[in-house]
Amino acid sequence: MSKFVSALNNEAYAGGIADVREIGLQGMITLRGDLSSAAVKSAATSVASLSMPEAGQASTDGQHGLCWMSPDELLVLCPHDAVAANLEKMGQSLGDAHALYVDVSDARAVFELSGPHAREVLAKLVPVDLSPAAFTSGMFRRSRMAQIPAAFWLHAPDTFRIVTFRSNAQYAFDLLKVAAQPGSEVGYF
Amino acid sequence: MLILTCPCCGVTGEETEFHAGGEAHLKRFGPGSSEDQFEEYLFMRENPKGVHFERWRHVNGCGKWFHAARNTMTLEVYGTYSAQTHTPPQDLRDRISEKVPGWSWREFQ
């Protein structure tokens, strides 16, 4: 059995105005299909026991989550070691329905950005309104972070989870580190 | 800077989250067409000062294609609409007419 390692092996940065860390292994399953169909809905909820998210939303709970990626795509989050079992479960509940589900855990990297200045740090990097009034808990946004695609949501108050492609992991980490360097508070929010 | 609203996922984002995909509503001519038609399809593009219709892709978001109507001079975005259509919707054309009376673009006005 091979040993799974995440892109940056839980690398962390704590010296700045917000803490940045790669959260390590996170199970991720892409589910594509007609999100309004009963089969796809039950396949998603069967593995996460969370409610289906509205457009642009994510329902998350710890390592579990259902994130709305696009009108026909859902990102299912689960513990890394439960992916194989969950894929099987999803296959059973999908039956003959026209849908696609695939393990993408090792194609992505997940970061956590936390601290009272987390909003400011992320707002330096993404073209999204991150004011507390505009970006609220439960929202899920795919956008770009400087030059790379990224998706993020508020995992807890002042704590973002950010998903990027694994090949961009080092770039994303360095980017967050620079944006969070000491003395770089903006004081906007 | 253009502010576009993706009609597929409803996200309003700025230009760099999207990618322009060239002129909208091109009619494709392939094998069996005349040389003039093929030339028209391949090379002849509008280059208006004013109302323009384009294809855009929400490349750093939901990944879907859509259409956008905008003004090349003022950079005003009149609206966005589904990619699955051959013509701009009438309500959008009415809205443009209110702002730019007498506009025309290819066969649309």
Image (tube, rainbow, N blue to C red):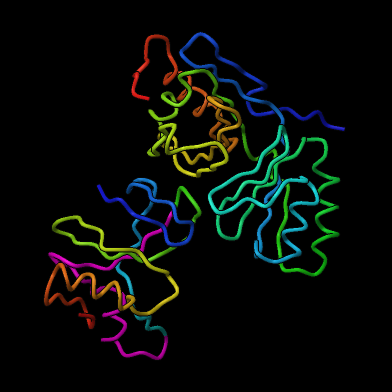
A59 sits to left or right of B51: right
Q: Is residue B79 left or right of residue A10?
A: left
Q: Quadrant of the C terminus of chain A?
A: top left
Q: Position of residue A23 (x, y in %)?
A: 66, 25
Nearest the camera: A118 or B72?
A118
When asked about the image quadrant of residue A28, the answer is top right
Q: How many numbered badges does the structure rendering display? A: 0
- Viewer-proximal residue, A36 or A12? A36
Q: Which residues are magenta?
A: B31-58
Residue B108 on the magenta span: no
- Which residue is situated farthest in the front direction here? A133
Q: Residue at x 62, y 18 (%)?
A: A11
- Residue displayed at 65% across by 47% down: A75
Name the image quarter holding residue B54: bottom left
Depicted A54 relative to depicted B49: above or below: above
Q: In the image, is residue B24 above or below residue B31? A: above
Q: Residue at x 55, y 20 (%)?
A: A20
Kindly identify the residue that appears in the image at 31 percent across and 63 percent down.
B79
The percent coordinates of residue B7 (x first, y second) are 43, 62
Q: Position of residue A179 (x, y in %)?
A: 42, 21
